[in-house]
Amino acid sequence: MAASATGVARGVFTRTSSGLVRTVGTTDTFFYCLIQLAITFVLYNIAFWFIYPGASMELASAFALVAAVLEGITYGLFGSIYPRSGGEYVPLSRAVHPLVGFVASFSQTFWQTFVTGVIVAGACTLGWGPMLTMLGLQTGNETLTNIGLWFDSPTGWFVFGTIAIVLFMYMLYRGMRVYFSVQRWLFTIALGAYVVFILVMILGSVGVFNFEANFDKYAGAGAYASLLKDGAAATDLNPPFSGTQTLYYTIWPAYLFLFAVLSLAFSGEIKNVKRGQLIAIPVAQIVGGVLVILTSFFARTSVGSDTLLAAGAVGADKFPLHYSWLTMLASVMADNVLLTIIINLSVVILTTYVAASTAIYATRGVLAWGIDGMAPAKAGEVSDRYHSPTYAILTVTVLAIGVLAIYSFTDWFKWIAALAPMSMVFLFTTFVAALFPFFKREAYEASPAKIEIFGVPLMTITGLLGSAMMAYMVYRAVVDENFGPTTPITRITMIGIFVLGAIWYFVARYIRQRQGVNVAARFQEIPIE
């Protein structure tokens, strides 16, 4: 029997292989990380900038990026020690305790399934709606406007979202090679379109486009002046710089950058076991961070800081166009049908693929539970033909569509905030990784993660620094009422998911022990590859 990285003999699993294969290259992993980073959510950052008067979007983004890169390096190193699919579940359950690993994984998998169903609706609100309503204005075609409004309606969310979920889940079923092949092409197109979006703002900054004139063209004579007047009544359009507000604002860009580490979900399917994650995660965070900073900067210089603040502060009822997203403002500024399509198509593709990337995490979490016996055995089954976790994919598909339906047609999920509990797991995992070389010395010494600076493990340096910065951001996410719901029921739900995970763990362990399965021995080994 082969020895595991923890030094324990292999042999307590019921099969010798998970069925997964290492087909994912470092470049595809980088693309995944950049998609998971959700650069299009910078539209939310800019829309709510007015809530933090005097905050510097660029400085806040730079601060958040440093924290994220420290986290990314730490995750990349930690993942190389336990190169198996399943996200944080595998390293935490083996390095700390099975209960800790499962509870963290249960929370992450729950929330990743939840956001899979919610984010596809976001593609309609951020992408389809603005694109089609703007095209309707530019062409004088009211039908296009109505179609855009239909997309951004409960029925539109559900119809488009269901189609999108079924399509990318089918690609996942066909295997990671197929999924990443499609991702590669669509992401290249979308990223190119996003660069065009930035170029449009650069041209607006140097005077090639006239935002004020074109805004009045589509919103009516004097609309721009009225917007600034209403905005000034709602907020300060020229606030002095505030370091405190900048620190408060860091949670908005941070909750883009931190999520690149979720490629840990498919560590068991990455070709470059030693350095694939270590390269892909921080590089994606840096590239995504640069794109977000450029977007924020040129948004201010092209459209104007006062315009952005006014557009956010006046609310939808007083804004003269259907949407006040930056992409809508850039489309107005460029006043070109082709550019409108290019700018907004990037948002449609990139936002939809965020949902696809969260689905990968959720399916691998369920798969890992099935392999360890923490879920029904079917959850751990992998297709012999496509090397994909068939029943895990089916489970997440049904749950995600269910979430989408509830989100679309009820208000039940409107108060749920997923970012804080997910970031808590990021913080905890980063901190554990920082200490890992000291409480699991033998495993660390034998792993690719053994990189030291003046005798101090790199993952300890990055992990401790990253944890310190992330702790502040997690705190702000919990207490900042402007960032997300902070009601008692929200916090109860967040805690309740962790508690439910613990209950699941003890019930599953009891059932397996009754069946004669040595669960404790399984957690002393790295799962089958």
Image (spheres, rainbow, N blue to C red):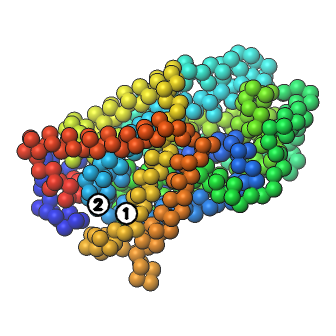
Q: Give percent across and percent down for residue 457.
A: 40, 75
Q: Residue at x 36, y 57 (%)?
A: 271
Front-most of residues 72 and 523 = 523
First in sequence: mark 1 or mark 2? Answer: 2
Outermost residue, front side:
488
Q: Give percent across and percent down for residue 434.
A: 40, 68
Q: Name the residue tied to disc 2.
A: 96
Q: Residue at x 71, y 49 (%)?
A: 52
Q: Is residue 200 above or below residue 141?
A: below
Q: Residues within 10 Å of mark 2 (few under 14, many from 20)?
A: some
Please state, as top left, top right, bottom left or bottom right, where the N terminus lies in the image.
bottom left
Gap in angstroms between the C-alphas marked 1 and 2: 8 Å
Side of 123 where 6 appears, left or right = left
Q: Residue at x 79, y 28 (%)?
A: 318
Would residue 334 be visible to someone looking at this image?
no
Q: Name the residue tied to disc 1.
A: 432
Q: Callout 2: helix, strand or loop?
A: loop
* Amino acid type for the residue under numbered disc 2: Val
Front-most of residues 502 and 187 = 502
Would residue 101 be visible to someone looking at this image?
yes
Q: Are marks 1 and 2 in contact (CB under 8 Å)?
A: yes
Using the rendered view, name the quadrant where residue 320 is placed: top right
Q: Is residue 475 above or below residue 319?
A: below
